Image: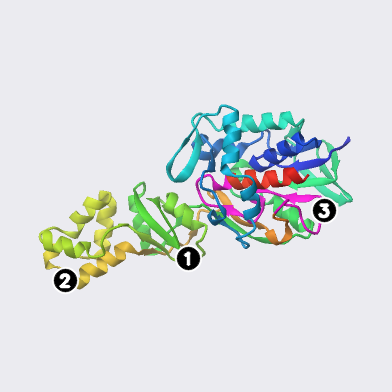
């Protein structure tokens, strides 16, 4: 069997389905190939099963890339409002959580069903359970699976990155890129918990404790919750800075954001018989307060402590440096930093500059969003850019 199409899309995730739907509705004959038995597996687990499908404030500043300007074109032409209009046209109820994050009221299954219906409107052919054996390029692209070969003048790589391998994620997109001579920016886990070793292992004793903090890595800061785990640090603030963290770097945590730097001196004046532990317990979860007080080493009443010691303690609480010894890897990473180099692609169409007809979209590209719906918005926007060009 050798069937011909106008375009073949590899991957039935968020980007692949969106691209196929847009191209199909423009009259193109589109085939989507997916190695999993069902489409949209990552969509289904996202947002705790409710799919954080976009962020209303998404813009280029919310993305990491070797070229920070690359994402501007696609994001400007397909905005969070555009996707929200599509969601509302399907009567999918939604709500906004913190920081502009939009979720389904019901289930992520509604988003997958919507994308499949959009594909159906465009006459898109979807084949699941088809692992790709080879891709050849001789004028047209020929994709061979265990079930046959398929040919098209256009091929879209939408197979994502290697994050969450238990969902079937691999580095297949990078293998294809190298086959076609496209540069790949070294992929690494992002939005991933950090691990602690050495003396910092003590913090594992408070596994399960979380607190609102400001976390900073490489001069980039996020004000959200941090969570101590049995392996190290997690929670939204830590996941966010993990994208900017590099091995050997510290991560600084402000445990008392908004506090006057002189607050301990004020406490000494107003409550001289109070202890550092008791003041910290007023501001933080008890177990976290206890371990921080112990490490700061100011025993007894504040009235007996020197101003210098209290200033030093306050300063450290405002910038407590952790030294992660690694991350929990792609297995626990929500996304991948790095990927197929944007220098190889048109920012308007997502087409490879040197290989006409080859497109790369979604997480496979070296564009990575913050936590909170930004990566879905890049999937939609890059997919529409390619779908409009096919």
How many numbered circles are shown?
3
Name the foreground residue: 133 vs 31: 31
Residue wearing tag 2 = 306
Secondary structure, mark 1, is loop
Q: Which residues are magenta?
A: 348-376
Whole-percent x and y of residue 11? 70, 42
Extreme residue toward the left, this view: 273
The answer to the question of whether label 3 and label 1 lie on touching residues, with beta carbons closer than 8 A, is no
Q: Mark 2 or 1 closer to N-term?
A: 1
Structural distance between the alpha carbons of marks 2 and 3: 71 Å
Q: Mark 3 or 1 closer to N-term?
A: 1
Whole-percent x and y of residue 196? 42, 59
Residue wearing tag 1 = 218
Dominant SS of magenta comes to: loop
Structural distance between the alpha carbons of marks 3 and 1: 38 Å
Q: Is residue 364 magenta?
A: yes
Name the foreground residue: 334 vs 89: 89
Disc 1 crowd rating (10 Å Cα; few below 14, some 14-19, many 20+) is few
Q: Could you tell me if residue 300 is visible in this image?
A: no
Left or right position of 140 against 258 = right
Name the foreground residue: 347 vs 30: 347
In the rendered image, which quarter contains the N terminus? top right
Q: Identify the mark at residue 356; answer none if there is no mark.
A: 3
């Amino acid at each position: 069997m050798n069937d011909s199409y106008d375009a073949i899309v590899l991957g039935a995730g968020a980007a692949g389905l969106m691209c196929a739907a847009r191209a199909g509705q423009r009259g193109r004959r589109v085939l989507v190939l997916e190695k999993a038995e069902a489409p949209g597996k990552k969509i289904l687990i996202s947002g705790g099963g409710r799919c954080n499908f976009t962020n209303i404030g998404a813009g280029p500043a919310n993305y990491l890339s070797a070229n920070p300007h690359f994402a501007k074109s696609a994001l400007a032409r397909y905005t969070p409002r555009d996707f929200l209009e599509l969601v509302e046209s399907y009567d999918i109820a939604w709500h906004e959580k913190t920081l502009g994050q939009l979720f389904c009221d019901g289930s992520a299954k509604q988003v997958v069903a919507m994308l499949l219906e959009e594909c159906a409107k465009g006459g898109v052919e979807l084949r699941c359970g088809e692992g790709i054996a080879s891709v050849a390029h001789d004028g047209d692209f020929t994709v061979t699976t265990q079930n046959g070969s398929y040919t098209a003048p256009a091929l879209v790589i939408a197979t994502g990155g290697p994050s969450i391998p238990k969902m079937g994620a691999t580095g297949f997109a990078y293998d294809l890129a190298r086959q076609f001579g496209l540069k790949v920016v070294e992929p690494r886990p992002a939005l991933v918990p950090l691990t602690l070793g050495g003396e910092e292992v003590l913090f594992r004793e408070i596994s399960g404790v979380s607190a609102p903090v400001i976390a900073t890595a490489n001069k980039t800061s996020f004000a959200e919750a941090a969570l101590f785990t049995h392996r190290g640090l997690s929670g939204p603030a830590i996941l966010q800075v993990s994208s900017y963290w590099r091995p050997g770097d510290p991560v600084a945590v402000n445990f008392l954001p908004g506090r006057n730097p002189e607050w301990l001196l004020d406490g000494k004046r107003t409550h001289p018989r109070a202890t550092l532990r008791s003041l910290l317990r007023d501001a933080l979860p008890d177990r976290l307060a206890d371990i921080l007080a112990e490490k700061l080493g100011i025993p007894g009443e504040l009235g007996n402590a020197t101003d210098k010691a209290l200033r030093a303690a306050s300063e450290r609480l405002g910038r407590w440096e952790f030294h992660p010894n690694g991350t929990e890897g792609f297995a626990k990473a929500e996304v991948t930093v790095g990927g197929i180099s944007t220098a190889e692609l048109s920012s308007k169409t997502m087409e490879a500059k040197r290989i006409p007809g080859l497109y790369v979209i979604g997480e496979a590209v070296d564009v990575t969003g913050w936590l909170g719906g930004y990566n879905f918005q890049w999937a939609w926007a890059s997919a529409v850019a390619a779908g409009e060009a096919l």
